[in-house]
Amino acid sequence: MVTELWVHESLRRQGIAHQLMAVAKEQAVLEHRRAIILETQSCNVGAISFYQQEGFEPIGIDSCCYSNCDLERREVRINMGYFPNFGITTADEKI
């Protein structure tokens, strides 16, 4: 689980976040974890884009994580997951 990923504004766009995420992915594989799970806010478009570039996909939302009015505020928690491939072929890939 990634609990925090933040790069100081003056150090952004230098590949640091990609390097940090690569370490997390490598560790997940070494520990035979089936997924890396994280959350971000729906209004954090930059983070969502970054995580998608890193291979994460949306796996759920929480419409009352931040307050009881999250939907009205248009700010919900988005859960995202990365699923390492351990060389397992799915039924779809066999076709």
Image: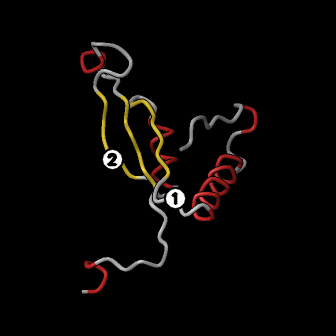
For residue 59, which numbered disc appears in the image?
Answer: 2
Q: Is residue 42 above or below residue 27?
A: above
- Label 2 secondary element: strand
Could you say which is closer to the camera, residue 56 or residue 46? 56
Q: Nearer the viewer, mark 2 or mark 1?
A: 1
Q: Residue furthest right?
A: 10
Q: Residue at x 52, y 58 (%)?
A: 33
Of the residues shown, which amino acid type is indicated by label 1?
Arg
- Spatial distance from mark 2 to mark 1, Cα to Cα? 17 Å
Q: Which residue is mark 1?
A: 33
Label 1: few (<14), some (14–19) or many (≥20) C-alpha neighbours in 10 Å: some
Q: Residue at x 26, y 78 (%)?
A: 92
Mark 2 is on which residue type?
Ile
Extreme residue toward the top, this view: 68
Whether residues under marks 2 and 1 lie with C-beta atoms below 8 angstroms apart, the answer is: no
Question: Which residue is painted at 47% across and 78% down in the image?
Answer: 87
Q: Is 76 on the left-hand or right-hand side of 95?
A: right
Q: Quadrant of residue 7?
A: top right
Element assignment for label 1: loop
Where does residue 67 sit, x and y in percent of width and height? 34, 13
Closest to the observer, 47 or 66: 66
Q: Which quarter of the picture shows residue 29?
A: bottom right
The residue sitting at the bottom extreme is 95
Return the disc, 2 or 1, that comes first in the chain's sequence.
1
Q: How many marks?
A: 2
Coordinates of residue 63 in the picture (x, y in percent): 28, 25
